[in-house]
């Protein structure tokens, strides 16, 4: 028998490496969102819904030069938070909802143990979704900033 690490040690190392790779993906996504222009684009596309928005409309709404916008869209697409598809002569960008949901789950999976699932809600009272309720509790919706 050849001396060396046992199967269990190799097995653990494999999963540790996998976790590191997954964390690196999340770091890349958070880094992309850490730039104000990219965050503005991402939030615009969140509001646009699953169909997304064409580049011309994004450019009109965020008011930045085309080359800068292209750079930001490319960074958000490379990290997996956006998808792009061509329809005729237009390119549409949309949020990659499964990846975005995965990032949100990662950010919240280890926190808030013992707290109600919805911040600001008491365990015995259903959460109101009105704008006034969000303002009172300090939570912001898609366009309350």
Image (tube, grey):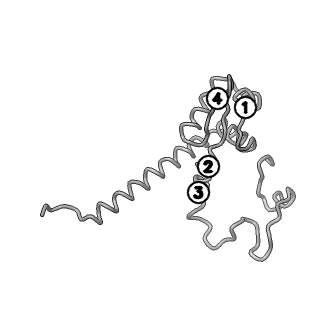
Sequence order check, earlier mark of 1 and 2: 1
Q: Are marks 3 and 4 in contact (CB under 8 Å)?
A: no
Sequence order check, earlier mark of 2 and 4: 4
Q: Residue at x 29, y 66 (%)?
A: 8
The numbered dot on residue 86 is 4
Q: Nearer the viewer, residue 110 or 57?
A: 57
Q: Are marks 1 and 2 in contact (CB under 8 Å)?
A: no
2 or 4: mark nearer the eye: 4
3 or 2: mark nearer the eye: 2
Q: Residue at x 85, y 59 (%)?
A: 130
Q: Which residue is mark 1?
A: 58
1 or 3: mark nearer the eye: 1
Q: Secondary structure at mark 3?
A: helix
Q: Secondary structure at mark 4?
A: strand
Question: Most extreme residue toward the front, as rendered?
Answer: 88
4 or 1: mark nearer the eye: 4
Image vertical order of residue 141 relative to residue 115, above or below: above
Image vertical order of residue 41 relative to residue 71, above or below: below
Q: Which residue is mark 3?
A: 107
Q: Residue at x 69, y 28 (%)?
A: 55
Q: Nearer the viewer, residue 91 or 117?
A: 91
Q: Horizontal and vertical percent for residue 79?
A: 54, 41
Query: CA–CA distance between discs 3 and 4?
Result: 32 Å
Q: Badge 4: how crowded within 10 Å, few (<14), some, or many (20+)?
A: few
Q: Is residue 60 left or right of residue 30?
A: right
Q: Badge 2: how crowded within 10 Å, few (<14), some, or many (20+)?
A: some
Sequence order check, earlier mark of 3 and 2: 2
Q: Are marks 3 and 2 in contact (CB under 8 Å)?
A: no
**Image quadrant where residue 139 sits:** bottom right
Q: Which residue is mark 2?
A: 100
């Amino acid at each position: 028998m050849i001396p060396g690490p046992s199967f269990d040690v190799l097995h653990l190392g494999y999963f540790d490496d996998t976790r590191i790779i997954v964390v690196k993906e999340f770091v890349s996504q958070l880094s992309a969102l850490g730039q104000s222009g990219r965050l503005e684009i991402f939030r615009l596309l969140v509001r646009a819904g699953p169909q997304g928005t064409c580049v011309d409309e994004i450019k009109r709404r965020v008011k930045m030069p085309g080359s800068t916008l292209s750079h930001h869209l490319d960074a958000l697409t490379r990290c997996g938070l956006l998808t792009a598809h061509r329809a005729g002569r237009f390119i549409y960008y949309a949020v990659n909802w499964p990846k975005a949901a995965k990032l949100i789950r990662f950010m919240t999976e280890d926190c808030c143990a013992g707290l109600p699932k919805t911040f600001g809600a008491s365990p015995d009272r259903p959460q109101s979704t009105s704008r006034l309720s969000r303002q009172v509790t300090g939570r912001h919706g898609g366009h309350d900033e």
